[in-house]
Image (cartoon, grey):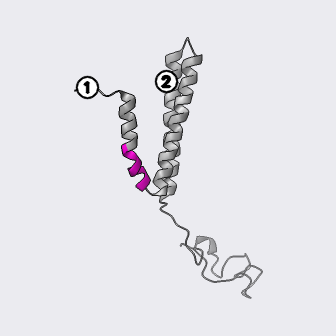
Amino acid sequence: APMVPLSTRSALLFLALLPVVHAMTPQWRGLINGTVIYIALGVIAMFFVVCISKPNKPLFVTSVVLTTVCTWLLWACCYMSQMYPILYPMLGEAPGDHGEAHGDGHGGAHGGDAHGGDAHGDDHLRML
């Protein structure tokens, strides 16, 4: 069987994946787009390293590859953590706020006893 050149196989794979990428939700498309941008930046950096550096080329190539992969990994983790957040803002009372207004006539400007806490003096110890 004749071998298909790598560039042709890559183009065919890209064309085969287009409908899959198009069907993805916008969050995943953003991750794909960001990954493509990181790959492009890595290729550009590799081009500069290969063209400019002569004596320590393997060291610079390794540095560019590791830098690109590590920064992409950091970005991808941050991006994916915001795609479907675990914590959502909850509307309503703040934790520990039981509808008691300060200065409601229970002693002092802050309510409670003379030292500014509640009537039992354990306002700072109240658990949620």
* Mark sitting on residue 127: none
Residue placed under numbered mark 1 in the picture: 2
Instruction: Tell which of 2 and 81 is nearer to you.
Output: 2
Q: Is residue 21 magenta?
A: yes
Q: Is residue 98 left or right of residue 72?
A: right
Query: Callout 1 environment at 10 Å: few (<14), some (14 to 19), or many (20+)?
Result: few
Kindly give the residue lying farthest to the top in the view shown.
Answer: 55
Where is residue 63? Give x, y as percent: 52, 25
Q: Residue at x 51, y 22 (%)?
A: 61
Which three-letter amino acid code belongs to the residue tagged 1? Answer: Pro
Q: Position of residue 21 (x, y in %)?
A: 42, 50
Magenta stretch, residue numbers: 16-23
Label 2: few (<14), some or many (≥20) within 10 Å?
few
Image position of 105 (left or right of 24): right
Q: Residue furthest right?
A: 109
Count of marks placed on residues: 2
Q: Main secondary structure of the magenta part?
A: helix
Question: Where is mark 2, residue-wise?
Answer: 62
Q: Is residue 33 above or below residue 50?
A: below
Relative to 71, say whether 1 is above or below. Answer: above
- Residues 75 and 14: in front is 14
Which mark's residue is nearer the viewer, 2 or 1?
A: 1
Q: CA distance from mark 2 to mark 1?
A: 34 Å
Whether the magenta-drawn stretch holds residue 17 is answered as yes
